[in-house]
Image (cartoon, helix red, strand yellow):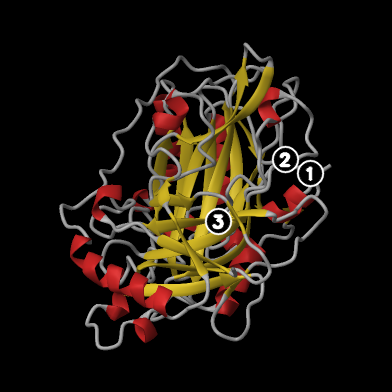
Amino acid sequence: MLMVVFLSGLVFLGGCGGGGGDGGPEGDLGTFLGLLGDAGFQVREGAPIGIDVRDLFCRKVLPSGFGNNLATPYLTLSVDRLPGTPENQFPWTYRLRQDEALVLIGRTPPKSVYFSLQHFAAMRYFEEADYSGRVYSLLGDTINHLTVRSVGAAAPFDSFFVMISTGNRTTERRLRSALLGAGYAETAVNVEGLPAELVRFGLDERSDQFNLLYRVAIIDDPEAERRFYETFGGMKVFRVTPGVELPADPFPAADLRERGTGTNEMHLLPTMKRLEDALIEAHPGYNVEKLPTAQWIADGYNPILQNIDAFAATNDTTYLITQPFTLGEDDFLVAYGVLHDAAGKALYNSLNVYGWTLLEDLPDEPRFRGLREMVGVSEANSKGLLRDSARAYLPGDPNAGMFYAVKISRKCGADGCVPIPEPFCDRMKLKELTVAFRAYCEPKTKTGPSYGEILFDRVILFRRP
């Protein structure tokens, strides 16, 4: 039962399929595959796929939404298992032998605010409980648009790239040699080393299952966006397996890009206080409750070291969240804070409203206990609705353009409100809710801002007496 959309007839863009004899970046695919065969590798072709988390949740393929980000639709891979090995838990997870590799060949997205590719340790076998459960933890830094090696006039966008993901350095060297021998440009080759220190390679039921997520946020041109999601940039996916298992030659766990620049947003705190006072004054007659926000997901390698579900968190962003709350028909929220891109601390920031109701339709098993909806139902970001939204509350303030203030309600009018919709399906109740905030990529560090250098977003809950 595949509850995902397989995109057929992927279009080759540029020279992904051949013609590498002129020394251009896009080598000859047939030559590359032939060289792999000559070197004793077996090659199986996979496919890029798109997944709709809300649909998967409603169909109960996923027990929860696990904190999906509506601002970045999820692309991933379908990779066949090897003959005689156990079934994968999902169509988008796969086990890998320590010397295997996945090779992606294609073009990056059109101009956008952000994109990244990254593997996660998705599912892990827990011996004491005898089941495979989620960890969805990062294994290193992303390859994002600030770090990707790609070749083209518009690079890093709409440009040719190759990505090798493997846990074995010998495999990586041999694949790189075959790529260069087939005419691919060295400057287009990216390597993601999967560290044996953090994962359990193997093909049996107790081995980790991996997943790659390809996130793209806010593509500039709607027509270019449509074409990209129809073709995924002509991406080809190959599972490459040595015919005879190679000796272990592991990648170490890499040092992660360091957050923080030594500059912070604390000078904006007086304006933030004025904004808070103005918001409360603008809505008389309500009972006011200030909802605190706090860091949601531990960053770095901490989750995988403790076998904690990290919800596919990336180090490219911060994760903040409010405490859960209920919201009556006549109640509303106002979320407010710094536009971190305007302050120079991020490329963009966003908020997501999540259903947070405790789920009651799951088996009474340890892996499901306490699980909540965690499904994103609406979103706003600093390139759209949030931009310039605080100016009306801060007349004459020179910092007004660095702030946002937006209403969140079950009854949105035409006043720039973030709507809380009716439930999408029977599983979704939306009785309890929460609001989460992300700030993606500080330009100077090419990773997420430091939590200690930004002002946390805030939320005020207005209730009718």
Mark 2 and 3 residues: CB-CB less than 8 Å, in contact?
no
Mark 3 surroundings: few (<14), some (14-19) or many (≥20) residues within 10 A: many
The C terminus: image quadrant: bottom right
Which residue is identified by label 2? 63
User: What is the secondary structure assignment of the residue under circle 1?
Assistant: loop
Inter-mark Cα distance, 2 to 3? 17 Å
**Going 42% across and 27% down the picture, which residue do you hit?**
195
Residue 130 is drawn in which quadrant?
top right
**In the rendered structure, which disc, 2 or 3, sits on the residue that comes first in sequence?**
2
Image: 334 above or below 452: below
Inter-mark Cα distance, 2 to 1? 6 Å
Q: Which mark is residue 60?
A: 1
**In the rendered structure, which disc, 1 or 3, sits on the residue that comes first in sequence?**
1
**Foreground residue among 140 and 110:** 140
Image: 34 above or below 398: above
Q: Position of residue 394 (x, y in %)?
A: 31, 82
Mark 1 surroundings: few (<14), some (14-19) or many (≥20) residues within 10 A: some
Please, what is the three-letter code of the amino acid marked with disc 3? Asn
Image: 406 above or below 100: below
Left or right, 170 with reference to 428: left
Please, what is the three-letter code of the amino acid marked with disc 2? Pro
**Foreground residue among 443 and 342:** 342
User: What is the secondary structure assignment of the residue under circle 3?
Assistant: loop
Q: Which mark is residue 69?
A: 3
Mark 2 and 1 residues: CB-CB less than 8 Å, in contact?
yes
Please, what is the three-letter code of the amino acid marked with disc 1? Lys
User: What is the secondary structure assignment of the residue under circle 2?
Assistant: loop
